[in-house]
Image: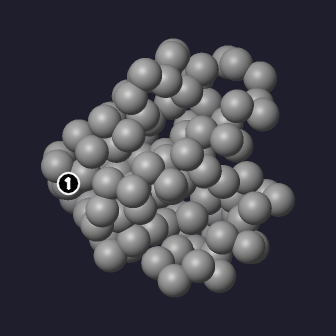
């Protein structure tokens, strides 16, 4: 499955001046790594955000967030954000910031 290049560019823009960001092709999409840790990614037209176990349940209750399932297993700590939830620059920045907040708590790889 191809991923939405436009959404990927918008994620790059939202990451702005964040240091130590790299990109990696994964899961048929693109992942954005910060200090070697997965922060967010684009799969198809959907944003995937690593929010961690503490914020996970709370954020899943938001309107545009849903559970991520890979190989028939729920990936706790990661949420999918449907396109309606990333339509504006502000919405996208908010989700990317949530991912950055979590990965900043992890040691660099």
Residue tagged 1: 4
Q: Secondary structure at mark 1?
A: loop
Q: Residue 64: where, in percent of width, then height? A: 47, 78
What is the quadrant of the C terminus in the image?
Answer: top right
Quadrant in the picture for residue 97: top right
- Residue 71 vs 17, above or below: the answer is below
Residue 63 vs 85, above or below: the answer is below
Q: Position of residue 1 (x, y in %)?
A: 22, 58
Q: How is the image coloured?
A: one colour
Looking at the image, residue 56 sits to the left or right of residue 11; the answer is right
Give coordinates of residue 86: x percent, y percent.
35, 64
Front-most of 1 and 108?
108
Q: Who's the residue at 73% across and 73% down the image?
A: 58
Tell me if residue 86 comes above or below residue 99 in the rendering: below
Q: Is residue 102 left or right of residue 21?
A: right
Residue in view at x 50 percent, y 30 percent? 33
Residue occupying image coordinates x 31% and y 48%: 29
Residue closest to the eye, 12 or 2: 12
Is 108 situated left or right of 26 in this image? right
Q: Residue at x 75, y 61 (%)?
A: 55
The front one of 72 and 77 is: 77
Percent position (x, y) of residue 24?
A: 38, 30
């Amino acid at each position: 499955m191809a991923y939405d290049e436009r959404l990927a560019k918008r994620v790059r823009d939202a990451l702005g001046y964040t240091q130590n960001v790299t990109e990696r092709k994964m899961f048929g999409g693109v992942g954005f790594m910060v200090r070697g840790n997965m922060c967010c990614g684009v799969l198809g037209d959907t944003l995937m955000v690593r929010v961690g176990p503490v914020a996970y349940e709370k954020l899943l209750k938001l309107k545009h967030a849903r559970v991520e399932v890979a190989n028939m297993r729920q990936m706790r700590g990661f949420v999918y954000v449907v396109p309606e939830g990333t339509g504006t620059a502000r919405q996208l920045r908010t989700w990317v910031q949530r991912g950055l907040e979590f990965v900043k708590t992890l040691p660099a790889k």
